Structures are given as C-alpha cells and as structure tokens.
Amino acid sequence: MANKIKIRVRVPKTAKKGQLIEIKTLISHNMESGQRKNKKGGKHPRKIVNKFVCKYNGKEVFVSDWHPAISANPYLAFFIRAEESGKLEFSWTDDDGSVYTKTASIQVN
Amino acid sequence: MTKRVIERTLSRRDAIAALGAGVLAVAGARLIIGPAQASPDSAEAFMSKLIGGRATKGGKITLKLPPIAENGNTVPLTVSVDSPMTASNYVKTVHVVADGNPNPEVASFHFTPASGKAQATTRIRMAKTQNIIAVAEMSDGSLYRTARNVKVTIGGCGG
C-alpha cells in the first residue's frame, strides 16, 4: 500500500437528545484479499482492514469484523443514539497491526 | 461352465475399474474445488460455527442487496434488524456469510443499545452468483436468519 490512508467520516454537528444519527465512514485501503494472482504465479499476500471500532465518549458502541469479502476502500454506515455531547472516535485495524484513527465531535441539545 | 467363468472375470474387472474411476473422480473434484472455495455446505457449516450450532428462526432481519450485481467488486449490502434496541432487548451481533466466495466469511456487526437502530451498510465482494446469508443474534440469545440470492455478472475476487 503505497498511498497514504485517507479517512472520511460524516457525523452531524448537532443533534437532539435521543435522536438517531447516521454515521458514514470511508477509508482508502486496497483490501488485498489474498486471492489475486501475481506475475510469478503466486498470490499477493492478504492485507486488509479486519476490524472497525466506534467509541462514543470512550465507550464502544459499534464494532465490526471484516473479512476479505469487504470491497476495497471500505464504506460503512451505521447508527448511534445521540445521548450527550462529546467525542466520537473511529479506528480501523490493519492486518499488519497498524491502527488508523479519526475523531469527530457532536453537540447534543 | 465357461460362460460362468467369463462372467465372474468381467464382474471383477468391472468392480476394480469402477473403484479406480471413483477414486479418480473424488481426487479430480478435490483438485478443481480446492481447499479455498466456499460451497453452500461449507457456508452453512461456517455459519453454524459462528452461532454455536443453535437453531434459527425466520423474520425480523432484512437483507438488502441488488438482485443483479453487474460488478462483483462492490456490491452494496444493507442489513437491518427489527428491534427496540433497549438495554434489555437489543441486537447483539449480525453475521454475514457468502456461499460462493473463496471464503465464506464476509463480516460481523456488533451492536449495542447505544446503536439505537440495528442497521449497517457496507460494500462487499462477490466472486459469482450466489447466496448471501445473514443471521442476527439478539440479547436474549434468539437467532433470526435470512438469505438473498444475487446474480453476479462480473466476479470480484481478482483472478
């Protein structure tokens, strides 16, 4: 993976207490499946993002395990219930152990 | 007398030939399918391992996929489960498996009461026309299952 990982996250800036908000995330990653053949007749080794975690003020609210069947540049949309103002932390764990993170803040009225 | 002898020889030969052909056929099938190819059976076995072999019911869970996917590299998938998502009654996990990909596993989504709504959208790879199976595990341990068939025009696992 020569390119730098780019992360985009869409979180509403404000929400009413108890409101359901949709969070959309996108991370640039090849998600090398381990199935693609290379010129030498072997296969490109697997290298994917295998775990996504969303924390809301330090508490895990949504976790997802990924396998090679997830497309390149994984997109993920999910919901959380806005209960208090604070920080949303997103992290993606790579097969090689690196963790890519992004944070967003939300104002709950 | 002679006739009987011939018959016996033939039948023994046939038996040996049949045995040989059978062995070859099994070996051939192994070679073609290989260890890295999910089949409906192995997908079921994998799902059953994920949920600990417990019985599933229909309903509550909805899997949204296009009936025909032109590009198997990115097939949009939305899974949602009907649940109030309260502290005492919520969806814990949704497992998604595919029965025609090199590996059956696709993704697992773990929800909490703070999710508010048990729904997740992502994009998946599909090698060929196949079934996608989803099972939701609720906080009380009950399991709900659904499956969708998707026709894939161009496979997306990289040859």
Image: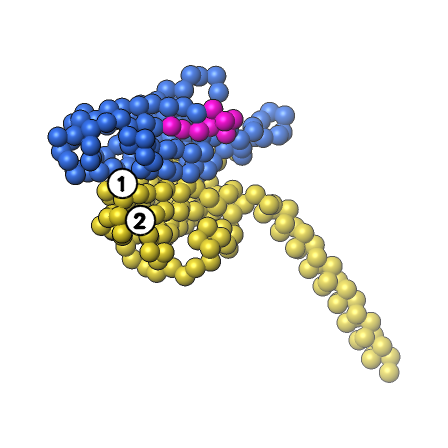
Chain colours: A blue, B yellow
Residue drawn at x 77%, y 64% as measured from the top left: B16
Range shown magenta: A91-98
In depth, the one of B53 and A46 nearer the eye is: B53
Q: Chain of mark 1?
A: B
Estimate the x, y position of residue B9 in percent, counting from the top left.
82, 71
- Which numbered disc flags the more N-terminal residue, 1 or 2? 2
Q: Answer few, some or many: residues within 10 Å of disc 1's Cα (few below 14, many 20 plus, some between 14 and 19).
A: many
Query: Can I make out residue B148 in this image?
Result: no
Q: Chain of mark 2?
A: B
- Kindly identify which residue carries mark 2: B91
- Kindly identify which residue carries mark 1: B115
In depth, the one of B8 and B40 nearer the eye is: B40
Residue B150 in magenta? no
Query: Can I make out residue A59 in this image?
Result: yes
In depth, the one of B51 and B126 nearer the eye is: B51
Amino acid at circle 2: Val
Residue A93 in magenta? yes
The reply to whether callout 1 and callout 2 are in contact (CB within 8 Å) is yes
Amino acid at circle 1: Ser
For residue A92, side relative to residue B84 (left or right): right
Residue drawn at x 29%, y 32% as measured from the top left: A56
Relative height, residue B14 to residue A70 (above, below): below
Estimate the x, y position of residue B69 in percent, counting from the top left.
36, 40
For residue A97, side relative to residue A63 (left or right): right
Residues at discs 1 and 2 both on one chain: yes
